[in-house]
Amino acid sequence: MKTEFDFIETIRRRYSLSKIGDDCAVLSKDSKTDLVITTDLLVEDIDFRIAWTTPEFLGHKALAVSLSDVAAMGAKPVWAMLSIGIPKKIWKTDFAEKFYDGYMRLAKKFQVEIVGGDISKTPDKIIIDSIVAGEVRKGKAVLRSGAKVGDLIFVTGKLGGAAGGLSLLESGIRFDSKDKIRRKNLLLKQLQPSPKIPDGEFLRENNLATSMIDLSDGISGDLAHICRASKVGAKIYADKISFHKNSSPAANSFDEKLDLALNGGEDFELLFTVNPKKYFQAENEFKKRRFFQAGEVTANLEIIELITKGKSKILPPKGYRHF
Ligand code: ADP
Ligand code: MG
């Protein structure tokens, strides 16, 4: 069966839609500034479960996932729109008010202005469409297509936490503010992710990233998008991956942690490529920000190799697919 990525590629080619394919579309605003814009759809029982989250967490996450795409362009978020379809039985409760409390708290943090949206009724399930637009200096948005052979591959933070949190939710554990800090942190990585806006802006302002994407579907899937767009390949070193320290309640062995880190989605860290010379200039700042090197860019077109204890094998894209 075709994946959503195959379908998007088909319409992009058939109708010559040149602005499709990155984390955000880049549009010209004026002679100094480009506008970036992204939309994300969240469907109940597909992208979230009401019983596993709270309305406040869900409001936060609806905005966070789109802010993360703006971060992946190295841009500053400025405006947002939110549309929600909601069943009557939920509308009668205080769900919508609490949802907006979570959404607005995050909007305030990044000084994002809400400029519109829409509300409708659905027969049964909640559906949310989150749009965020932002600004970046003309021609400076960081695309998926700029990686060069020999560039180093970096990630802005530890991986596998969101997938670890999801596996706790699947096993019946729910967020409880009085719970142990380790378990709470893991669940919060899944339920209330932090978009890496400051890291994205830092990388763009200092011209450090040759390409960038946010990790919504796991390294195996998202690095494949960079490789396809940049017409390169990549090597990932298993022993260089930095795991979320709390992923252990969900994964015991190294292989289980590696699987969560490579194939688990929704960490919303940024994955970027950097020229080795530029990296040496920025090494201290990278350390301070706790970025870690995961691998390097190769000429092996669209092939991602995973190196474990000196042995190489192909890493197939196993990240999240809707279809
Ligand atoms: P992300 O995970 O970064 O949000 P997606 O995988 O959702 O990105 O989408 C990849 C690209 O395809 C984006 O540029 C997005 O705008 C575009 N896209 C996704 N769905 C559609 C659609 N239904 N019509 C047109 N473009 C789409
Ligand atoms: Mg993205």
Image: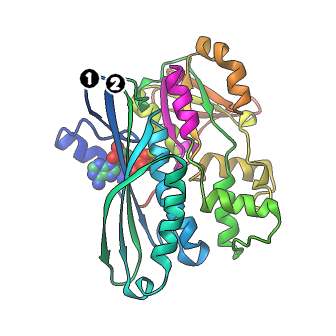
Disc 1: CA contacts within 10 A as few (<14), some (14-19) or many (>=20) = few
**Is the residue indicated by label 1 positioned so its CB lies within 8 Å of ligand 1?**
no
Magenta highlight range: 197-220
Dot 1 or dot 2: first in sequence order is 1
Is 323 magenta? The answer is no
Residue 153 place in picture, x, y as percent: 59, 28
Give the amino acid at mark 1.
Answer: Ser
User: Could one spot residue 174 in this view of the protein?
Assistant: yes
The residue tagged 2 is 138
Left or right of 5 in this view: 218:
right
Is 184 situated left or right of 192 in this image?
right
| Amino acid, disc 2 | Lys
Residue at image position (51%, 45%) is: 221
| Label pair 1/2, CB-CB below 8 angstroms | yes
**The C terminus lies in quadrant:** bottom left
Q: Residues within 10 Å of mark 2 (few under 14, many from 20)?
A: some
- In this orientation, which residue lies closer to the viewer: 280 or 319? 280
Q: Circle 2 sits in a helix, a strand or a loop, which is it?
A: loop
Rendered location of residue 285, percent (x, y): 68, 23
Q: CA distance from mark 1 to mark 2?
A: 7 Å
